[in-house]
Image (spheres, rainbow, N blue to C red):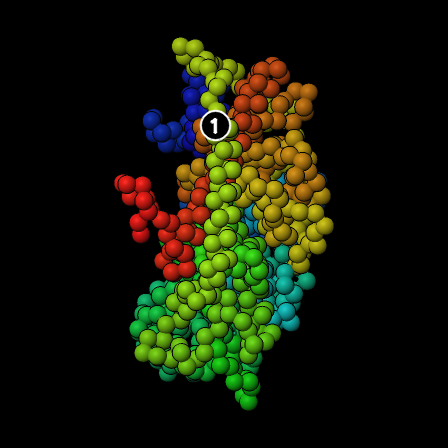
Amino acid sequence: MTAAEISRIAGVTRATVSNWRRRHDDFPAPSAGTETSPLYDLPAVQAWLRGRGHTSTASPTEELRTALRLLRPGSGVAARLFPLAAGASRRTPEELAELAALPDDRLIALAEKTAGELPAAVPEAEPVRYGPDDADAVRALLGCVREAGPQAAVDVLAERELDEGAASGVYQTPEGLALLMARLLPADASRVLDPACGSGTLLAAAARQGARKLFGQDSLPVQGRRTAVRLLLAAPEAETTIRVGDSLRDDAFPDVTVDAVLCNPPFGDRDWGHDELAYDPRWAYGLPPRLESELAWVQHALAHLEPGGHAVMLLPPALAFRSSGRRVRAELIRAGALRAVVSLPARAAYPLHIGLQIWVLQRPEPGGTNRTTVLFVDGEGEQRDGAPGTATATDTATADTGTRGGSRPRRSGSPSSTDSSSATSFDWPGLTERVLGQWTAFTTAPDTYADEPGVARAVPLVDLLDDVVDATPARHVRATAGDIDPVALARRVDDLHKQLAAQVTALAASSASDGWQPSGASAREWRTATVSDLARGGALTVLRAATPGTRGSKGSGAPTLERPVLAARDIAAGNPPSGTAVDIHTDATQPVAAGDVLVRAVAGGGDAAAMTRVADDRDAGALLGQHIHLLRPDPARLDPWFLAGFLGAEDNIASASTGSSLVHVTPGRLRVPLLPLEEQRRYGEAFRRVHELRAAVRRTADLAADTAAALTTGLTAGVLLPPDVPDASGSCSV
């Protein structure tokens, strides 16, 4: 391991590690590397740290990553640890701790026995063998399963195996998006297939919605194992069959038909088998063009459906308008196979620079009802219109009457870049409500469905079958001048102006500069302690963040909530709890209390949104969401706002984080000055004022953006008149 890795697990700076090397003769000597970049033996370093009372402050997942990095490249131990992660999930935390404490030989023997408990659902689940060199990785895995949950351990193993060259450009479907796609399926869909299952997120979402027979295939063995283990953990009662292979060239389920297909297929694959599959019977709607591999996946999905079955697929926006795919699109529309297209905002999922689309398809039933319309839902309108919270013509036209799809989804903070997490700051519940409201109304009564201009519209097939056959939602749903009520818009603009004026006054009060004084000729210096040190001393307690699918999850169904959930996006935005069952922390018994310090566990690189805040009376009693660290200070020893202010400092977050495009915060490594309680309270009051300033700025910016957008819409649509402008003589001219 490197000196940087030593600093991470010890919770100190690189300079401290350098001092240890110079000042302590018993510090472990380098075992590899160079003079300028030495490498150290992990067990020797851990023994030295324990001897001096230093416990690891690295997260369990980071410790597992470190242990895997220290193994010989190409050893394949990550792949061999998948079954152990599944087997370990059936042990209690106490049993896992006892197992990890065993000597190497007994540990290896029992680890092999535990891994052998894995059912045959995992591809290539032959008996595994571990050697003495694997003992540290086995212990780290058991610790990760015990502390962070088996799903977190599985994700680290997959990350390691993919990093060794198995693939590149492999991204997980965000949890919120997966649940939205699963909820677009009929409620009675019991048999579900994902022919490009990846990490298994979509199949796990289907299981949460009630699916009981799950089929998956992926071209990468590591992804097949990952999906199988994930489903064993998330839906143990489901019947799971996972296979490895190229679904288009070597379909593992040629004779299987299902109720539904969920799929996020690879995009832009030019080597999908165009020539060798030219006469494949799956191409019922036309041979997919060589550069349109996505149309091959669409028809592959339809071929696996029972008549009347649904497929929900995540696809690139160009598929809706590229000329090369026009004939296949036309046949899909003419046959009634394309039921709906939903556009998503950019950065909702990889690739982040474009707004993807959800296509809902249905295999036509012989003699079934003729479908005459296709539903288009624009979920990216807010992103396209500009700032978060921007009002559109639809917003203003329907402000007084409400809308079927619920409120326009709002985004807060910077979207992150993973699964998990493109989405920690993305309002998936809001977008899901909006889309499902339109889809439910459309499928319940398609002949009487009422369009919602600017949001959703049911377009007759004949209007789509022109020379272009463009299925882009924004083209079909945009609001026109005739959709806007001039009186309602003028009333809305007047109300926004009044709100903005009041908010500007509040912002001016929050930004008062009196009382701020320099500390002297130079910056203050103080002794600091890590959060881990404070926790060991009893000054605070820490509840680590958790991710979906880990120990304590509610199985295949979402929990029924009687209390709100505080989500990570609420910390960034300073909002009261807005989460749903999708956002819930695995420890659902842990309510938030007023005075708790909340720390976001994940943020995008360069994220300027608030990373911390103190829970108030609005938050009290709410359940804790995912991706949040909760710190509960002893009020007799630590002031909450003092703690939150210093923990959220940019330098502090950077020194306690790993990653670049996506930053994972390790709370134990955050540092806090050691100050008397009275002085803490002075700093705490200052940090509280800073928080209020940030909140006032955000509210003012949102109102200004809403006001500007409403005015622009009204003027350009011809439903608002500009005010009279006085000329130089004082009279008005137009």
x and y, in percent, of residue 125 in the image: 56, 60
Name above or below for residue 515 compared with residue 131.
above
The kind of secondary structure element at disc 1 is: loop
x and y, in percent, of residue 126 in the image: 56, 59
Q: Amino acid at mark 1?
A: Ser
Q: Say which quarter of the image contains residue 33.
A: top left
Q: Is residue 181 visible?
A: yes
Name above or below for residue 635 compared with residue 505.
above
Q: Is residue 325 left or right of residue 639?
A: left
On the rendered image, what quadrant is the N terminus found in?
A: top left
Depth order, front residue of 25/700? 700
Name above or below for residue 221 compared with residue 156.
below
Which residue is located at x 55 percent, y 20 percent? 683
Depth order, front residue of 534/73? 534
For label 1, count other residues whose C-alpha is less than 10 Å away and answer few (under 14), some (14-19) or many (20+).
Answer: some
Which residue is located at x 41 percent, y 51 percent? 711
Residue indicated by mark 1: 511
Which residue is located at x 49 percent, y 58 percent? 487
Q: Is residue 124 visible?
A: no
